[in-house]
Image: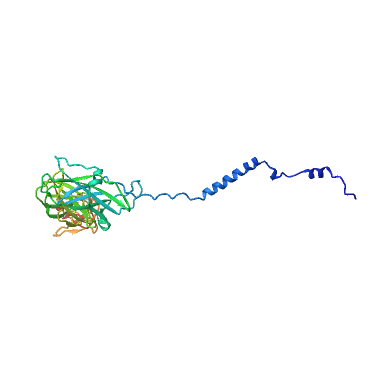
Amino acid sequence: MSSNVAPTPVEKRATMTTLPNPAAASPRRSIRRLVPVLAVMVLAAACGKKGDPLPPLRTVPLVTKDLEVRQQGSAMLFELTYPATTSAGLILGGIDSLELYRITKPMVGDDPPTAQAAEFEADSEVVRSLRGTELESAIVGNRIQFRLSMETPDEEPPEASIFAVRTIKGLESSDFSNRATLVPGPPPEPPTNLELIARPRGVEIRWESGEAEAFDVFRRLATERGYGPPLMEVPGDKRRIADLRAKYGERYIYSVRAITGDDPRVESDLASEAEIDYQDTFAPRLPKNVVALPEQGAIRLRWEPSPDADTVGYFIHRRDVGRVNFVRLNDQPLPSTEYLDRGLASGLEFAYRIQAVDGEGNTSDLSPAVVAATR
């Protein structure tokens, strides 16, 4: 057969179809196609690159704003809130040390002098530094309390001491605190002969003292390390007071401090402490107005309750005809204030007495006898 056979129309179209030649594409179109690819590559590279490290968070303690100082005997007592946060409001996690600064200035007139923060930066001296176990022992609850000895001034007018503190965490220090001023004066003598007396409704505290404008009474549990705020302030003409908030079953330690002056306020040292184990050993008070009402073969008893809140019930005592002694009728305290004595012979006379009992088993005296005869 001849090889010069003409192709069919379909075959001709197939042979005439050609693919586009990339090399022949427009340069501008090729660039447009490469731009998205390059952008993705640049972003991917940027995501994997590390930036400059962030600076560490600073631990500057929050500035103290409630520094207080007052004279107690021949010492100065300082008190402030333990800083819990940084100046940025973050949790601080404790401080490493505390520094107490002082400036002294002469008194001019009746008003104590003042000092600005800039003066502390330039002229103050560090008079106390607390750190380690000394700082830990000064922490009472959320407060820092510490003492600094002083000399009672002889000159008139005395010099004023102006104080401020800084708290330190690591290498960071807070700004100076508020300024607290003390003008020392002769302190009163501490009270003596402190005596504690357990009472049914509280602990009575007695002491002896010279002249004073007031007394601060302190109380703490025997398990606590230090005193908080005074339990009460007593006028200077008093030498005894009752602690009505004392609770049975607790062991307490008390002390008293004398106070003279108001501005400045001068306090004595604490009196020698006294301790008491306050237990309920007190009988409840007698029930009143006991009456005996005769019934058929029975006597009904009624009475007013004991006024003591810890009374849990009553014992009933009866004396039969011809007997001398009273016999208790119930083994367990009767919680109500009424009792019906049944099964008695008619026409006989019986005497009754009531006794109150509290939750600790303390019993009152017997009430006066009441007599009634059955019908």
**At which x and y percent is residue 162?**
20, 46
- In the drawing, does residue 346 fall left or right of residue 4? left
As rendered, which of 89 and 112 lies closer to the eye?
112
- In the drawing, does residue 54 fall left or right of residue 229? right
Residue that appears at 33% across and 46% down: 87
Residue that appears at 18% across and 42% down: 113
As rendered, which of 208 and 211 lies closer to the eye?
211
As rendered, which of 293 and 104 lies closer to the eye?
104
Q: Does residue 29 sit above or below 150 in this rendering?
A: above
As rendered, which of 172 and 267 lies closer to the eye?
172
**At which x and y percent is residue 139?**
26, 54
**At which x and y percent is residue 174?**
30, 48
Given the current orientation, which residue lies at the most extreme right position?
1
Q: Does residue 127 sit above or below 116 in this rendering?
A: below
Q: Is residue 349 visible?
A: no
Q: Is residue 6 visible?
A: yes
Given the current orientation, which residue lies at the most extreme left position?
210
Residue that appears at 50% across and 50% down: 49
- In the drawing, does residue 26 fall left or right of residue 55? right
